[in-house]
Amino acid sequence: MFFGITNIWTYVAGTFLIILLPGPNSLFVLSTAARRGVRDGYRAACGVFLGDSVLMVLSAAGVASLLKSTPVVFSIVKYAGAAYLAWIGLGMLRAAWTSLRSRAADRAADRAPDAELGAAATAQVTAEITAQATPEAGPAGGTGRAVRSPFRKALAVSLLNPKAILFFVAFFVQFVDPSYGMPALSFLILALIAQAFSFVYLSTLIFGGTFLSAHFRRRRALAAGLTTGVGALFLGFGAKLATATLS
């Protein structure tokens, strides 16, 4: 037994497999890195780390019991999280549509008799479409820092999932010896192991996302298709969370 932890290698193997399962957190980090680079990818990853850490602390503090005994609180957090995931998904679908429209405008400009004039018109149209359709744009074309921050978005995605608290309790408690005098220490070690696996996995996604981005940069149709697929997955995650139950 290691600091009140039983079957630690079983826990390590289980954590490794669970981390590999696709979910909104990992998908958001991957898409952020692909669209905005390594730095913003790690900002999104930090939001996931903080969100998961908060959920782990809450699970150890007994918030899971509160959620089970107060279905209204569970439902409020659940539907807020589902709406936020759907909002991200719709934003990605809009971005994909914008990319396809700008690609069509570029092709039309290439066929124009005056190529220079066509290019200028295309640039103006593309700028207007982007300003109007980008989901991160604020009022009057401005950009709200709180809205565009990958860290804050990832933090919200992580925190607005009450099922995660229930999962951490159900998973961690299997490996904690009830007779151990400091169960909080056992939970802390389990959490650190999970976060270490998460860091390695998200780092792989970040660099993988930037690698794919370099290959798809000039293939806007393919990039738009992938963005559409990711947006649809986020809509699916939102629907799944909205229909989640306490059982």
Image (spheres, rainbow, N blue to C red):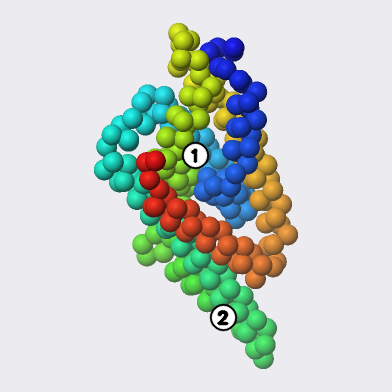
* Residue 129 locus on image (x, y percent): 49, 72
Q: On the picture, is 106 further left or further right than 158? A: right
Count the labels in the image: 2
Residue under the point 28% across and 34% down: 69
Label 1, residues with CA under 10 Å away: few <14, some 14-19, many ≥20: many
Residue 120 appearing in the image: no
* Residue 88 locus on image (x, y percent): 46, 56
The kind of secondary structure element at disc 2 is helix
* Residue 55 locus on image (x, y percent): 43, 33
Q: On the picture, is 226 further left or further right than 175? A: right
Quarter of the image containing the N terminus? Answer: top right
Q: Would you name the residue on which mark 2 appears?
A: 121
Three-letter code for the amino acid on which mark 1 is drawn: Gly
Q: Which callout, 2 or 1, points to the residue nearer the camera?
A: 1
* Residue 109 locus on image (x, y percent): 63, 83
Residue 47 marker: 1
